[in-house]
Image (cartoon, grey):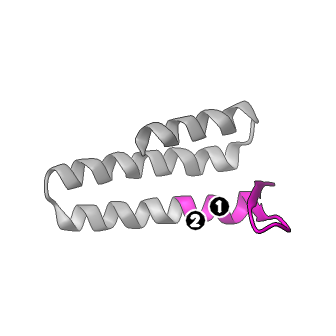
Amino acid sequence: LEALLKTNAAFWKGRKDVAPLVHADAAGKAAGELTAAANAKNEAGVAAAQKALNASCGACHTAHRERTPDGKYAIK
């Protein structure tokens, strides 16, 4: 997930769109924290990192994608 989010951040950086880049960076940080917490078997840390990851991803998806007539999604 961390690698995917780095690719995501590079995409938004290429589009010179700062707002989704902030979300991508926050999601990448949360993904790293999730990995560390899972490796440490820290349930509270996993829950906190999951919450942060979901918030970052959800905020970006809500703001920067739209459903197309065929039911798929496109970047706004």
- Label 2 secondary element: helix
- Label 1 secondary element: helix
Count the marks.
2
> Does residue 25 lie above or below 61 as drawn?
above
Which residue is at the far right? Answer: 69
Residue ID at (76%, 68%): 71
21 sits to left or right of 36: right
In this rendered view, identify the residue nearer to me: 37 or 70. Answer: 70
Residue ID at (37%, 63%): 50
Residues packed near mark 1 inside 10 Å, few (<14), some (14 to 19) or many (20 plus): some
Amino acid marked by disc 2: Gly
Residue ID at (21%, 68%): 44
Q: Residue 67: give x, y in percent of width and height.
A: 78, 66
Amino acid marked by disc 1: His
Residue 13 is tagged as none
13 sits to left or right of 68: left
Q: Residue 43: give x, y in percent of width and height.
A: 19, 66
Locate the C terminus by quadrant: bottom right
Q: Residue 36: give x, y in percent of width and height.
A: 23, 48
38 sits to left or right of 11: left
Which residue is at the far front? Answer: 70
Residue position for label 2: 58
Residue 61 is tagged as 1
In this rendered view, identify the residue nearer to me: 39 or 59. Answer: 39
User: Are the residues at dot 2 and dot 1 in contact (C-beta closer than 8 Å)?
Assistant: yes
37 sits to left or right of 56: left
Which residue is at the far left? Answer: 41
Q: Is residue 64 part of the magenta span, yes or no?
A: yes
Q: Is residue 24 part of the magenta span, yes or no?
A: no
Whole-angstrom CA distance, mark 2 to mark 1, is 5 Å
Magenta part of the chain? 57-76
> Does residue 48 lie above or below 28 as drawn?
below
